[in-house]
Image: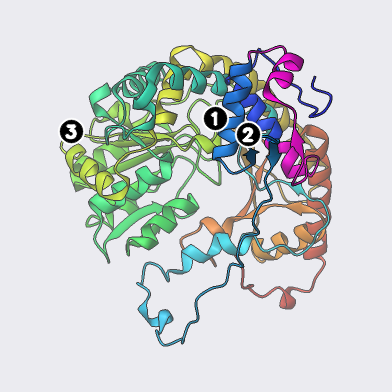
Amino acid sequence: MNRSLGLNLDARRSEPYYQQIFDQIVQRIQSGALPAGSRLPPTRALASELNTHRNTVVRAFEELNGAGWLEAVVGRGTFVRARQAAPPNAAPASAGALPWASLLSRGASAEALGRSERLSVGLTQRPCVNLQRMQPPPELLAMDELRRCTDHALRTQGHRAYSYAPTEGIARLRRLVAEELSRSGVPARAEDVIITSGSQQALDLVFRALVDPGDTVLVERCTYHGALTSLAAAGAHAVGVPTDGEGPELAALRRHASARALYLMPDANNPTGGWLSQARREALIAWSREAGVPLIEDDYAADLDLDGTPLPPALRALDGDVIYITSFSKKLVPALRLGAMVCPPALRPRLLALKYAMDLCSSAMLQYALAEFLERGYLRTHLKRALPVYRARRDALTEALAIHLPEGLTVKTSRRGLAVWLPLPPPIDPREVFIEAQRRGVLVTPGTISTVSPDEPSGLRLTFCSEPPERLVEGARRLGEALRAVLARPIQTRAPLEGP
């Protein structure tokens, strides 16, 4: 360690040694440990103390000079440069002449787009148990494995990792995704796969390709909020189809033969966790062929099987015209922002043209890293570690809810995914429970955010992935208190609320 600078360097780290020197000097400048005007040791002396070559220190100093952190004064040495204060971020004056409210498109003003924003409005600053966040906790983010794969990709791919990727995605990743899907029972070839920036982009592309403003798209009455927002932005008319114990009711579907598509989550509905029976899947395929209405299969919870119970075959396995969408966000890391879509050959050119117009391509750097991750077998290793953790957390939450929920309320457990569903019968308004639960220190998601009409009966989505078991138990206790408080209020005071 250098006594004058306090540098603590590790030759085992993957980045170049000069970069470690650069980073640690910058950190010390930013923290105030090296104030402006401080004189740094000569490069020869610092190299000796760090037991490295002088050229390494010289390169670090050159980088620091070029970035404006240091300045070299001939005959005197190298000093920390005084940083100029940034000018105030003043917005240009506005005369307020443009009527922005009337200039917005109908899609940008759709009611569904504002629901999630209202969820983020906090009513309390106290620490909350989070049964709202649907993403892996820090300890299950596979950070070390992804870091190794990213480092390897940058070393071996060179400029390709920093360049535009093909619009459909790099060939190696498409091949590996197709192999993973085929192993899980979803037939796919590399040429059928399109890599997207998460499943949300895939949904948006499909809706853009199939739907004109005013067209009808069928969804389950309680469905993924992101699908509703994409449909709203496209100007589509979402129609909620009632479901029974097996899936969407076929009689209701037959009343909408002119619909442009039916969007489904067959294996783990978000938010209800429901799944389609094999008989209903086969009936849906027959209806799709007869009516000429495409099926969009969203498998966001792919590989997140908590009980190992075999599921019926994917819709895509029953019919090659099914559009299949999946994501790596829930099972790996949200920041990866990579998903995949398997589509019929006739639709592929149109989807690629739309994707090119939207973003040219998804990140090449992330695609190379994910390809390395899959090829090394890290995904299967990661899931073997993560699934028992999620199973234990699910069981902790459901067991605690069985103890703390008011009489007459029962949570529906899940066999797949990262959440459970608590149906709320009328006159309990999920939005009222959301507000009361937040006051008591537990965050939940009201099902009204996921219904076609925000006033339809629904429930609460309760995630279990982000909190440890003891916190989940406490969250169940606080939610039970919130529900009892709402139930204790006179019915006439429980009118529908403005909220998510």
SS at mark 1?
A: loop
Residue at image position (50%, 58%) is: 451
The amino acid type, in three-letter code, at marker 3 is Pro
Q: Nearer the viewer, residue 486 or 360?
A: 360
Tags 3 and 1 touching, CB below 8 Å: no
Identify the residue under disc 2.
Answer: 136
Identify the residue under disc 3.
Answer: 345
Q: Position of residue 81 (x, y in %)?
A: 67, 46
Q: Position of residue 20 (x, y in %)?
A: 65, 25
First reached walking from the N terminus: tag 2 or tag 3: 2
Residue at image position (25%, 28%) is: 192
The magenta-colored residue range is 26-53
Q: Position of residue 368 (x, y in %)?
A: 40, 24
Q: Position of residue 195 (x, y in %)?
A: 34, 33
Residue farthest left in this picture: 346
Identify the residue under disc 1.
Answer: 331
Number of labels in the image equals 3
Q: Which mark is residue 351?
A: none
Q: CA distance from mark 2 to mark 3?
A: 34 Å
